[in-house]
Image (cartoon, rainbow, N blue to C red):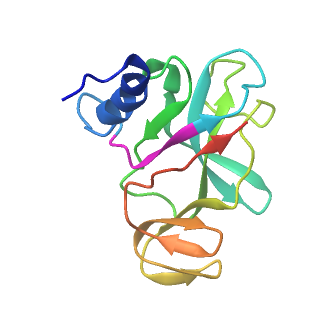
Amino acid sequence: MQPMNKAALALVLPLALASCGVLGVPRGDVTGEIRGTQPQTGNVRIALVGLTGTGYENNAVDQLDIGTFNPQKRVYSISLPDTAKAGVYEVLAYVDLNNNKKFDANEPRTQRATRGLIYATSDASLFGFTVKKGWNRFDGTTVSQTRPFGNYDLNW
């Protein structure tokens, strides 16, 4: 067996650690990569925010300073809460300018995408999608419930 080079280890180790779910480490329900150039210096955090008709509702769920696992701020992994309010959610990365560990609308964030997460309290037809109870990922018009939700890449 050939030894793993440092670059490969830097990518694999954070995901392996994050997927184990011990000692407060995320279970790896949603994993991905942050691409592009960070728009401003500061701590990069990951947030799971609920989307409403008027904007964002910060649900204060598992916001993780990704620098803890990944100094290059490129690979991330988070846990989803076991239960949540029924609705549509988005995972985003942001620069925490005021260090309050919460996403604020004025902070630089990754671009919006045509994918997100839906939490359903029962099997239903929501927002034009047929979803099952629990967490569902939608990407365009495709809905899946198979976790982990991998390749949930974010772009600055």
Q: Residue at x 36, y 20 (%)?
A: 5
Can residue 138 be seen from the camera position used here? yes
Quadrant assignment for the N terminus: top left
Q: Residue at x 60, y 36 (%)?
A: 34
Residue 103, image x, y percentages? 66, 34
* Depth check, front residue: 1 or 46: 1
- Residue 79 position (above or below residue 34): below
Q: Magenta part of the protein: which range?
A: 27-33
* Depth check, front residue: 146 or 26: 146
User: Quadrant of residue 72 in the image?
Assistant: top right
Can residue 25 be seen from the camera position used here? no
Residue 59, image x, y percentages? 57, 46
- Residue 126 position (above or below residue 16): below
Name the residue at the left extreme. 1
Residue 61, image x, y percentages? 50, 42
Is residue 112 covered in magenta?
A: no
Residue 42, image x, y percentages? 68, 15
Quadrant assignment for the C terminus: top right
User: Quadrant of residue 18 in the image?
Assistant: top left
